[in-house]
Image (tube, helix red, strand yellow):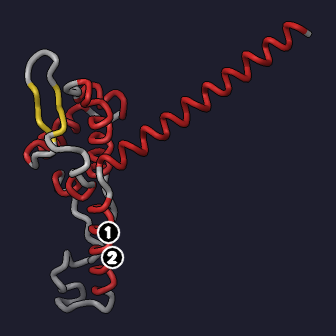
Amino acid sequence: MRLTTKGRFAVTAMIDLALRCADGPVTLAGIAERQRISLSYLEQLFGKLRRFELVSSVRGPGGGYTLAQPMELVTVADIIAAVDEPLDATSCGGKENCLDEHRCMTHDLWTNLNRRMQEYLQSVTLASLVDAQRQKALAVSVLHDERAAIARHEAGQSLTA
């Protein structure tokens, strides 16, 4: 059980899109460049995200993709489901034929893990991920400004000394 590149890239691309779509449609080429994801791979993912009605495409000059739903309503579970990403900790796919066509001793353990993973992924919205990215960017900007101010102050002191 693990989240593959498909699910990771889909979530990353959706965050990138959500961060920028207020300014209009976002191109896949832009997302590909910023996130270092193959453009052809993004095209496949966004085809699935569009069919799941998480994104909308805008054709023509200035076209690209926008969110089809408010980001507060889109969960990580929705994104992962849209790209057909299976998250299953059982070895049997939930069929209870783990061990020679019988249920294994740890089947309930892995089934409960599946349930908890799904609950957690349903609780994380695209909006919360975007907010976290904006807070990180703001913290980096403030730190950069503080360092620049210190450097200017130190440069001013060395000139007067």
Q: Is residue 5 above or below residue 40?
A: below
Who's the residue at 29% across and 25% down the image? 30
Q: Quadrant of residue 104?
A: bottom left
What element does badge 1 sit on? Answer: helix
Q: How many marks?
A: 2
* Location of residue 32 in the rendering, given as x and y in whole percent from the top left corner: 30, 31
Kindly identify the residue that appears in the image at 55 percent across and 33 percent down: 140
Looking at the rendering, in which quadrant would you find the C terminus?
top right
* Residue 65, disc: none
Q: Which residue is mark 1?
A: 117
Q: Residue furthest right?
A: 161
Q: Nearer the viewer, residue 147 or 116?
A: 147
User: Residue 46, located in which quarter of the rendered image?
Assistant: top left
| Above or below 91: residue 155 | above
Which residue carries the number 2 mark? Answer: 113
Q: Is residue 88 left or right of residue 51?
A: right
Task: Tell me the amino acid under the disc marked 1.
Answer: Met
Up the image or down, 140 lies above or below 50; here it is above
Position of residue 112 measured from the top left corner of the image (x, y, whole percent)? 30, 80
- Toward the viewer: 147 or 60? 147
Closer to the camera, 77 or 90? 77
Tags 1 and 2 touching, CB below 8 Å: yes
Look at the image and tell me in which quarter the N terminus lies. bottom left
Residue at 80% x, 11% y is 156
Few, some or many residues within 10 Å of mark 1 (<14, 14–19, 20+): some
Q: Residue at x 21, y 51 (%)?
A: 73
Residue 51: x and y in percent read: 7, 46
Instruction: Give the SS element for disc 2.
Output: helix
Q: Amino acid at mark 2?
A: Leu
Left or right of 102 on screen, residue 156: right
- Front residue of this view, candidates 135 and 64: 135
